[in-house]
Image: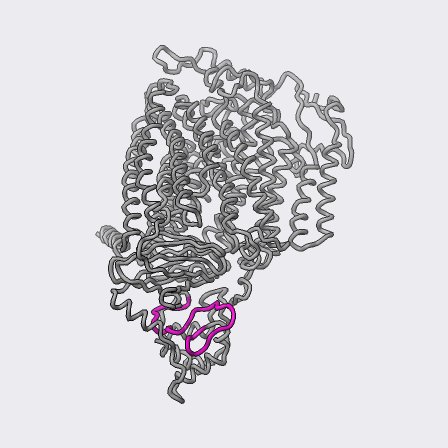
Amino acid sequence: MFRHKKIYWLSFIFLSSCIEDAPLDSLSPAGPYARSIDELFWLTFWIAVGVFVIVQGALLFSVFYFKEREGSPEPKQIHGNNFLEILWTIIPVMILAAIAVPTVQTIFDLAREPEDALKIEVIGHQWWFEYKYPDFGITTANVLVIPEDQPVRLEMWSNDVLHNYWVPKLNGKKYLVPGQKTYLNLQADSPEEFWAQCGEYCGLSHSKMRGRVISMTEADFASWVENEQSYAEKELPESSLAAEGQLVYLNAGCTQCHVIDGVWDVQGDRIAPNLTHFANRNVFAGAALKNNRENLTKWLANPAEIKPGTFMPNLELTEKEINALIAYLGTLK
Amino acid sequence: MTKIIQPKKQSNIFKRPSSETGIWSWITTVDHKRIGIMYGYAAFFFLLVGGIEALLLRIQLASPDNNFLSAAEYNAMFTMHGTTMIFLAIMPISAAFFNYLLPLQIGARDVAFPRLNALSFWIFIFGGVFLYSTFLFGTAGAPEGGYLAEEVSRLGSAPNGGWFGYQPNAGMKYSPGTAMDYWAIGLQILGIASLVSAFNFITTILNMRTKGMRFMRMPVFTWMTFAVSFLLAFSLPIIAIALFYVTFDRQFGTTFFLTEGGGDPILWQHLFWLFGHPEVYILILPAFGIVSEVLPTFSRKPLFGYPAIVFAGFGIAFIGFGVWAHHMFASAISPVAQAGFGLSTMVIAVPTGVKIFNWLGTIWGGKLSMKTPMLFSLGFIGMFLIGGLSGVTHAIVPADTQQTDTYYVVAHFHYVLFGGAMFGIFSGLYYWFPKVWGKMYNETLGKIHFWLMMIGFNLTFGPMHWLGLQGQVRRTWVYAEETNLAFWNLIVSIGAFIIALSILVFMANWIYSRRKGPEAGFDPWDARTIEWSIPSPTPVWNFSKAPEVKSLDDFWHMKYDEDEEGRPVKRDTTDALLLELEEEGLNPKEDIELPNPSYFPIILASGLPFLGYAVIYKSLPLAIVGVLLILIGSFGWGTEPLEEEFTEDTENE
């Protein structure tokens, strides 16, 4: 009985691990691009399964049927068969040709620039993605917001090493290359939150170079755009914790790299995320952390502890400064 | 009594080495069998090291957000695991087989250039030692301007840019320190070793075949050696140039791959994979050769479609140069290139399929003797089939853009290189064990090894397909708990330790059987090719007289006739013939002239790491030492006494 229970338990785990939602699952397409890939994958998969069953079956059959037994006769010495050779050359060629047609078609379909696509620029940094909406004058990071049911054309490049942009439920991967532009189309069926992940090994914290893509209804997207276009408030209520936090931001060294529109603009390279609407983003630090008080405290205390190699220094902030800064970041909506 | 002709104890720089036993006899040997054995042991050592690195990776990934290894350590471990397994384990194990078997299979006394053979081995050793000295001397750190919470440990001071070394991440700005220089220069040195042996084997096959050994009578393993040698000769110069570019970028400020100086990081990918894809066939074709020897022997049938298998092998080698960009489908290439390389990748599946079908044709209707080598060869077909089919899914470019850079790919190439190449290699190790040692391995332990490895292998790499499709990217130091990847990662890690256990069983069997194994006799498998017509262990002179080959599978036809049904019938003369062969093989009638040992290959080879250190540390004295060693080695080599000075050694009489 015990043994049976164990089997039930194991099969439960097995099934649950299959059914449970994996946010990076490439087999649950949520948009037309991913779906066309998915269809092609399953077509190939089932053909492969067919070939596998036949060939592996022939192998296993031979192993059991032709296994040496007592009194097995010596086998006939057959050196080959031209008909068979031609047959097992031509059949695979025909199968592959059949798969090749939709493959080539899909390659060009996926590469085509859709009409009326929203253009968004994606810039790869070690280790986070930056997004710019040239039509709206928006710059943001980590969380890409797109309208539902509308094609989005990403124009991508990298600021440092190679990265690879991947939102498994929306499309396949595409590299971000320094000094060269690449393009990727995304489209989501409905309002949903998706995970993104850098695919190409890009240094120490590659595994923590993640992202989110949030698709919104048209109305929500319009109000999101409007809000993103606004600047942060420079004058904060005096002697509030947030005002103290703003002073920390202005004086502790954050302004070397981080822009907050309306408060501070960085001169030179903007190598860190724009923080103007930080509080609206549900993740930070390359989407490695959820945006909450506990995580922010950890991160501000020592960023390299969480993302080895990060370009954000440990500013040796006191607990008080960290609390103030978190309060200030919370106002950046 | 036999006379082995020996040279006069003459000297140019050193006295000519003359030890026949002991450490010096191994260091100075030019005997292809001893070099093969040394290649085998060295490669197996590196296989263990690479395996330990893999276990460390698997401990780290056994649970989500784990902290067993730091990011620097993890990245160093996966870089070294890949580099080690490819360049220091599988390639040299294949070289061990080539060295030991090639002359035996074509009826030669040695390879064409015995000292060159020793040189290639010693360059491999020094290259491996140089690469691994990074754990002692190398340095690695955060990219320029980045911060680390803790110092990088020794374990993390190994190369960390991936075995593929993508630029610009592997450049000086993003991978500072010396570790990646050890990688680039280490591979450069190892490449020389492979090039040297490639030309040696090509020449050997073209010139040293015994009487009657026409091309279409050569064993398939010899054919595959031939194909691999051409692959090496054509692909290694590409990576050599690319590695020179990298070293110059890192050390001397050039910008071949750096955008800021007008270079192109994608150029590196093209160069690397133009080498890297043929490299895959360099790793797998030797296993094809081994399996094509084992299956007929243990099925008691000739290889089905011998010419088809040979030409398919060369077809694969040839097309293998035209598919490289399928490693770059997500990279910056146009849809036209994607379509072209997608189609060429599909094309290569055809000759691969032809091979698999012909192997099935070989065992079909045979009398299969389920000995360990046969188990591994059959396992090879089954596992390689899976790797081949998942490979076809990579040719479907849109699907590949989902799969590339995920564990799906990791699963795929482990099914090819472990389920394929390594299963083939283990098959060969068991198959030729009695030939090399004259003893028989333990069959029970062999079978335990096979089944443990089969289970462990599938437990490790099977679920990786699923993990990849569920979004686990490669080279990932940690994965988030929310991704729901934990369960299968744990299973994978358990599987990895089962593989490790199976390797221990293999080692126990090897060590035990070499000492205590029963005498094997010279033809324990009733085999087909001429290396089995000589005594085991192979005498130092290989063949007491050059054999004359009359057909494919010559040794088999010496033993067996066919009745009218086409079934083999033992000839009346066979037993007498076998006795005679053994007697003759041990006591050659004619005088035997063997290539003479030499100090110079190891001296020449030892100069290369000094040059490597000299480049990394910009040290003139080290460069001078390196150049001097190479000069002494070459000069001594060139002036070493040749055959005309041979005198007969009468001490043996």
Q: Is residue B220 magenta?
A: no
- Tell me where residue B54 appears, x and y as whole percent: 46, 50
Q: Which residues are magenta?
A: A259-285
Q: Can residue A304 be seen at all in this image of the molecule?
A: no
Residue depicted at 68% across the width and 48% down the height: B610
**A315 in relation to B603, above or below:** below
Q: Can residue B27 be seen at all in this image of the molecule?
A: yes
- Tell me where residue A140 appears, x and y as whole percent: 39, 68
Q: How is the image coloured?
A: one colour
Q: Residue furthest left?
A: A1
Depth check: give the residue in front, A293 or A135: A135
Dominant secondary-structure state across the stretch colored magenta: loop
Depth check: give the residue in front, A327 or A65: A327
Q: Quadrant of the C terminus of chain A?
A: bottom left
Depth check: give the residue in front, B624 or A37: A37
Asked if residue B599 lies left or right of residue B505, the reply is right
- Tell me where residue B107 appears, x and y as whole percent: 56, 22
